[in-house]
């Protein structure tokens, strides 16, 4: 064997070893590296008499054989450690409900108990994701979330303490999602919109929306942008991950979370799972806190 052939063989073996290491990392390590992403929204439409409001947001749990209720308990424990005022779930609780129910018929009750254990004095709200409608889970998802103390919003708005109006948009892929439900936004309140599919943000220009949170994309899950055409789902191709400005008069923002679980392949690479903590406050609170610190 020539020297060049030996070098090429060595390089090939190194490449194979590197691929094996990266695959092992993407399967065994990164899917379990749960992070907390902290965001702030300081807005004059928030009631200055109300203290800052902490919102815990999670999405795309995709409970399945490789991501069980034991894994989900870590998410619930982390949310409760943050002591949020409000909790939002952005959809896709199960990856394929009927398949999971066959494999673990008693697990749903444990998941209901975990959801019920989440504490939030201003309420717990959810929307449907595409996997909640698919996989035979529509009716069960509704019941599980209700038993867990969550109120599901179907293109509806509710008013909360602190001058906040919360708007939930239904799933766009299989549900009856209506982006124009954002017309329920109140120009005299802080309007927080949550939905599964982020691409509806492109239709928010005419509405006084201050903040949108969405999931669905898993932050690409395998975060290699040159594969976007193949890996990003419908209604998740314009805004794959992170924060984006809204082109409306309120200078609103969109945040697309990487979510919690996985789908199709039980892998994550450069897209660690996260819960989001959004702190909403009035500028008056900020000045008051600064004065107190002095």
Image (cartoon, grey):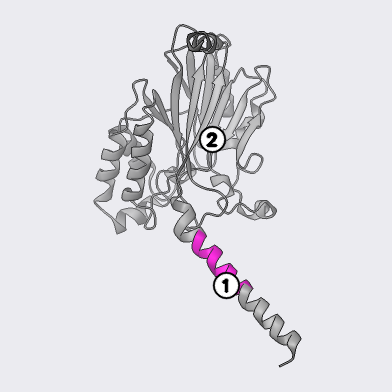
User: In the rendering, at what x and y percent does residue 276 appear?
Assistant: 48, 34
Range covered by the magenta-colored residues = 15-25
What is the number of the mark on residue 69? Answer: none
**Residue denoted by label 2:** 214
Q: Residue at x 45, y 39 (%)?
A: 91
Q: Percent x, y for residue 89?
A: 43, 34
Q: Which residue is label 1 attached to?
A: 17
**Is 259 or 142 nearer to us in this picture?**
259
Q: Main secondary structure of the magenta part?
A: helix
Find residue 69 and report its horizontal and vertical position in percent: 32, 48
Vertical comparison of 257 with 211: above or below: below
| Residue nearer the viewer, 188 or 278 | 278
Q: Secondary structure at mark 2?
A: strand
x 48%, y 9%: residue: 292
Question: Does residue 35 appear in this view?
Answer: yes
Farthest-out residue, front? 294
Q: Which-is-in-front pick, marks 2 and 1? A: 1
Q: Cα distance, mark 2 to mark 1?
A: 37 Å
Rate crowding at label 1 as few (under 14), some (14 to 19) or many (20 or more) other CA atoms within 10 Å: few
Q: Position of residue 246 (x, y in %)?
A: 66, 26
Task: Name the residue: 65% across, 80% down.
Answer: 10
Residue positioned most to the bottom: 1
Does the stretch in magenta take in 19? yes
Q: Secondary structure at mark 1?
A: helix
Q: Is residue 98 left or right of residue 252?
A: left
Q: Is residue 234 left or right of residue 32?
A: right
Q: Residue at x 65, y 17 (%)?
A: 250
**Quadrant including the N terminus:** bottom right
In magenta segment, residue 106: no
């Amino acid at each position: 064997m020539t020297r060049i052939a030996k070098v090429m063989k060595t390089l090939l073996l190194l490449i194979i070893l590197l691929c094996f290491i990266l695959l092992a990392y993407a399967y065994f390590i990164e899917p379990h590296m749960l992070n907390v992403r902290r965001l702030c929204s300081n807005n004059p439409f928030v009631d200055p008499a109300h203290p800052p409001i902490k919102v815990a947001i999670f999405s795309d749990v995709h409970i399945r054989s490789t991501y069980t209720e034991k894994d989900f308990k870590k998410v619930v424990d982390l949310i409760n450690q943050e002591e949020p005022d409000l909790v939002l779930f952005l959809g896709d609780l199960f990856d394929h409900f009927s398949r999971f129910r066959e494999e673990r018929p008693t697990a749903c009750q444990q998941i209901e108990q975990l959801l019920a254990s989440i504490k939030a004095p201003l309420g717990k709200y959810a929307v449907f994701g595409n996997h909640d409608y698919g996989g035979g889970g529509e009716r069960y998802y509704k019941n599980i979330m209700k038993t867990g103390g969550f109120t599901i919003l179907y293109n509806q708005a509710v008013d909360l303490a602190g001058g906040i109006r919360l708007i939930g948009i239904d799933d766009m892929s299989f549900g009856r999602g209506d982006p124009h439900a954002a017309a329920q936004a109140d120009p005299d309140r802080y309007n927080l919109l949550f939905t599964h599919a982020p691409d509806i943000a492109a239709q928010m220009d005419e509405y006084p929306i201050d903040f949108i949170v969405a999931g669905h994309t898993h932050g690409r899950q395998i975060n290699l942008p040159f594969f976007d055409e193949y890996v990003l789902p419908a209604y998740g191709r314009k805004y794959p991950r992170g924060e984006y400005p809204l082109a409306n008069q309120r200078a609103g923002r969109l945040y697309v979370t990487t979510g919690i679980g996985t789908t199709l392949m039980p892998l994550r690479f450069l897209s660690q799972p996260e819960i989001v903590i959004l702190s909403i406050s009035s500028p008056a609170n900020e000045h008051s806190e600064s004065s107190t610190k002095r």
